[in-house]
Image (cartoon, grey):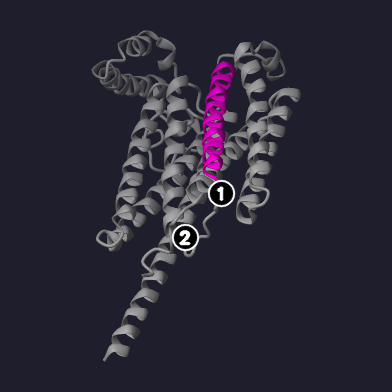
């Protein structure tokens, strides 16, 4: 009888491990899809396709967008400008209720927000594909949340993280509609991107929790603070990059080859700060050189940082080629995810989920 109970317990553990591996694979696929969406979002920005669809969630009032301006009403510009103005009035009320009266006043007084662009089929479909990928990710997140119910008693952290991720994705979708209605107001684009980083962080922690037999990286406590410093300076650098992007948005009417020369202090700060990012990551590699697992992960992180650095150099010296803009952002966000994974693994006591 005792042997039978032990065998049954062993079988239950094996079945739990199989289920956890399935959850882990879905979580990994979702994270990859989020990174892909970030890359596509970069393409949307680089090609100026952000207003390719002037409404949300549909595109020109259709679930499948038009392929010709002839498929649109003659007064489509006025129609969608009016639609966005009504949505902006709600947004303005939200901002004032939250205490951001000055920001609300700027949106209310900026009439350029309501200027509707001419229909461009390429830009419309680039933005539409961006939205389709977002819908797919939303379905992945819903499935993760549904699967997380099996852990609600034995491993509640997985359930609550899945729920938080779902809420974050819903909020991201809602805020994305405000980005469109405000005609890509610069600060809303920045907030939209940082919400995406929050989602990356939540999914990375879910991966960490459900990775079977993940090896802990044993290192002095000081290493953890170096990783935290690397993470903070990278986030600051990403924010500084958004300031450069906002400046470029204001220069979009100029020829591309004049953008760099027209940039001012924000570009100099962003360029100079990159050396601190590189230096801290070199220090991290040096500190983890005797730890096999830590050395591999820190070197992979350093490689991403260096490639991101080089793409930044390429943009500075070759007039910000559109192909490098999304790549530069993607590398930075992947680096952020690896930093978090390294931080979670340092001196971790985390074992395979539900194997005991």
Total labels drawn:
2
Q: Name the residue under label 2.
A: 211
Q: Residues within 10 Å of mark 1 (few under 14, many from 20)?
A: some
- Write down the quadrant of residue 54 in the picture: top left
Q: Between residues 334 and 249, which one lies in front from this camera angle?
A: 334
Residue 235 percent coordinates (x, y): 52, 30
Q: Is residue 53 visible to the viewer in this orientation of the structure? A: no
Secondary element under disc 1, as helix, strand or loop, is: loop
Residues at discs 2 and 1 in contact (Cβ within 8 Å): no
Residue 12 percent coordinates (x, y): 33, 77
Residue 248 percent coordinates (x, y): 59, 18
Quarter of the picture holding the N terminus: bottom left
Q: Is residue 232 left or right of residue 198?
A: right
* Residue furthest bottom as drawn: 1
Q: Residue at x 28, y 62 (%)?
A: 154
Q: Mark 1 points at which residue?
A: 219
Q: Residue at x 63, y 11 (%)?
A: 264
User: Residues in magenta?
Assistant: 220-249
Q: Between residues 131 and 32, which one lies in front from this camera angle?
A: 32
């Amino acid at each position: 009888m005792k042997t039978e109970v032990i065998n049954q317990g062993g079988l239950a553990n094996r079945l739990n491990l199989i289920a956890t591996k399935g959850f882990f694979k879905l979580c990994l696929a979702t994270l990859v899809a989020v990174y892909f969406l970030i890359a596509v979002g970069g393409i949307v920005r680089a090609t100026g396709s952000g207003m390719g669809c002037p409404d949300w969630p549909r595109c020109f009032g259709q679930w499948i967008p038009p392929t010709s301006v002839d498929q649109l009403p003659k007064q489509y510009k006025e129609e969608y400008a009016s639609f966005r103005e009504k949505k902006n009035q709600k947004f303005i009320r939200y901002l004032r209720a939250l205490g951001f009266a000055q920001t609300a006043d700027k949106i209310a007084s900026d009439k350029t927000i309501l200027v509707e662009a001419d229909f461009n089929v390429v830009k419309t479909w680039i933005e539409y594909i961006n939205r389709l990928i977002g819908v797919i990710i939303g379905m992945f997140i819903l499935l993760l949340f549904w699967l997380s119910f099996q852990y609600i008693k034995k491993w509640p952290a997985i359930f609550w993280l899945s729920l938080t991720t779902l809420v974050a994705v819903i909020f991201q979708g809602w805020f994305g509609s405000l980005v469109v209605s405000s005609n890509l107001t610069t600060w809303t684009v920045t907030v939209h991107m940082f919400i995406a980083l929050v989602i990356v962080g939540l999914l990375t922690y879910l991966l960490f929790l459900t990775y079977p037999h993940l090896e802990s990286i044993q290192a002095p406590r000081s290493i953890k603070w170096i990783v935290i410093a690397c993470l903070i300076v990278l986030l600051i650098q990403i924010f500084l990059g958004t300031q450069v992007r906002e400046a470029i948005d204001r220069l979009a009417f100029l020829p591309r080859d004049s953008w760099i020369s027209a940039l001012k202090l924000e570009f100099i700060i962003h360029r100079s700060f990159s050396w601190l990012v590189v230096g801290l990551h070199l220090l991290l590699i040096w500190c983890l050189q005797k730890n096999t697992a830590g050395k591999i992960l820190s070197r992979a992180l350093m490689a991403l940082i260096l490639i991101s650095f080089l793409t930044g150099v390429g943009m500075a010296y070759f007039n910000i080629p559109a192909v490098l803009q999304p790549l530069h952002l993607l590398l930075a966000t992947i680096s952020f995810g690896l930093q978090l994974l390294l931080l979670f693994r340092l001196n971790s006591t985390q074992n395979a989920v539900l194997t005991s």
